[in-house]
Amino acid sequence: MPEGKHSYLYYFLFIILIVSGIAGGGYFCCVSAVLLIVLMIMAVCLLIRSGEFWISFDWNLAAVVTLTLGYFLAGLWAVDSGMSLMGGIKFLPVLIYFFVMCQVLEQRERLIQSLPVMGSLMTVFSFALMQFPAFSEYVSVAGRLAGFFQYPNTYALFMLVCLLVSVYRMSIKKTDWMIAIHILIALTGIYLSGSRTVMVMTIVVFFMLLILKKELRKYSILCVGGFVILAAVLAFGGYGKGIYDRLLSMGGNASTFWGRLLYDRDAIKMIVTHPFGMGYYGYYFVQQEMQTGVYSVVSVHNEFLQIMLDIGIVPALLIYGAVIRSLLSENTSERDRVILAVMLLHSLFDYDFQFLMMCFVLLLFLDIRNVKRIKISILTKIAAGLSMIVIAVLSVIAGASDYFYIKGEPEQAIRFYGGNTMAKIELLNMSEGPEEMEKRADSILEGNSHVSVAYSAKARAAFSQGDVEAFVRYKLTAIRLAPYQYEEYVDYLNSLAYCAELYKQANDMDSARFCAERAAEIPHMLENVKEGTSRLGWKINDQPEVTLSREDLKLIEEMR
């Protein structure tokens, strides 16, 4: 590969990194859609202009292709096939970014050295915006600095990567005050993020450098000492007091830790029953009926398990195998090895790679081998152009739908793409009459039979129409799909009591008895929920409600 060729692609990849970072870290599908269109245009222009391309035929290519295309293929057996398109559009930019990067592998180090600059600017601007109530919600969460990721833990990981890049560069350039400033800002960002996991990892990494790297020893001591002094100064100045308290409670409040273990435990059960994955958002929809504790999360806070849940066991092993291969490769520098280890380890405790920017950053540190030059024909160029058009159309459809859903306009979101189930659920919650409610619930259940609120809506519609048997059937289905929703049991009981009273007034004692018998089953249903709750489920702060109030128990007795 000729040195310096296509150096302008460095600026292109640099801008993509910046844009993905500014736009929420590239978490949302609408951001991915825009990036995908831009990346596809560049990729196709490269193919048409040069008539050739460079690509790495190794494990990395297989992993990236599996990750991105897996979301499309999983739509064939997904829990919600409509959401699979959005999942595919979200992760397809990773493949195209990898392709463009392969054209200028010699520019990767320049991109890596630009990371501390990005991190410093993100920290400074987000900290400044955090001081204004109108903007604080976009750059912080519960008083914790989140950068433009809007999620403190992943922001903290990114700053740790920036910190390590700066520290290793400091060992090469003995005195560089700009690098020292980047280090200071990175330490500030990590502290203000309140991410206990990243703080522990930061201290462990620098203690390792103290022991193993003589040339980095003084910088490690300065970083650890600077971190302690900085935390004390910020706490004394009133910044991050809640963060300081959060750190002090690390050992005493273990609910978060037990919660993560609970997520993993329940996720493994789902993986066993769905070894080929459940598609994009499949975990979220199936979660309630298989969980053994009270929680509601979109991601499992473990990327290895998340990939298994989304697209299957084999793709997850392939993807993580590619990262481990680079981690153990002789061609990988010590700096890159440390950074890969940090990113890999942290991804087992959070959902870092749901952010496109972190996927792009990971690609920069992989050991890419066996790069070959491939010449293409006119037919290939035509096919690439047509593919770009198709992907652009799909990106607009999925991206616009996601954008309007985020804006709180679900009806507009569904107009762009009818497969956006999350928008349909939001629209269902806005329903005014029973007919409208039932129609919207049916629309959801046509593509996804695991949505509890849709069955609850159908139960409510049946109740308003006087169809008690249908009400009971749909309500029990809703409870089966979401057994920890205590409000459903109470609503079920009150509705049965109301119907029983009406039946008694009409002297229909058989129907009244039917309602009383169904009501009598509710305490046993809650007892089953209690027995099904795991030990981990009882160790977190959110405890299940498994006992009816005295008033409700008395109501059941009166119905008899």
Image (spheres, grey):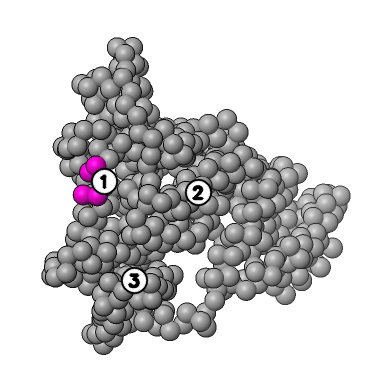
Per the rendering, the mark at residue 108 is 1
Q: Which label's residue is closer to the chain start, 3 or 2?
A: 3
The residues bearing labels 3 and 2 have C-alpha atoms spaced at a distance of 28 Å
Residue 213's tag is: 3
Q: Secondary structure at mark 1?
A: helix
Viewer-side residue, 290 vs 114: 114
Q: Which residue is mark 2?
A: 320
Q: Are the residues at dot 3 and dot 1 in contact (C-beta closer than 8 Å)?
A: no
Q: Determine whether, in the image, residue 513 is placed left or right of residue 392.
A: right
**Residue 130 can be seen in this image:** no
Marker disc for residue 25: none
Percent from the top left, x then y, of residue 480? Answer: 70, 51
Residue 477, compared with residue 199, is above or below; it is above
Earlier in the chain: of badge 3 and badge 1, it is 1
Cα distance between the residues tagged 3 and 1:
25 Å
Mark sitting earlier along the chain (1/2): 1
Say what secondary structure mark 2 lies in: helix
The residue located at (56%, 52%) in the rendering is: 305
Find the magenta span and give its range. 106-110
Q: Are marks 3 and 2 in contact (CB under 8 Å)?
A: no
Residue 133 appears in which quarter of the rendering? Answer: bottom left
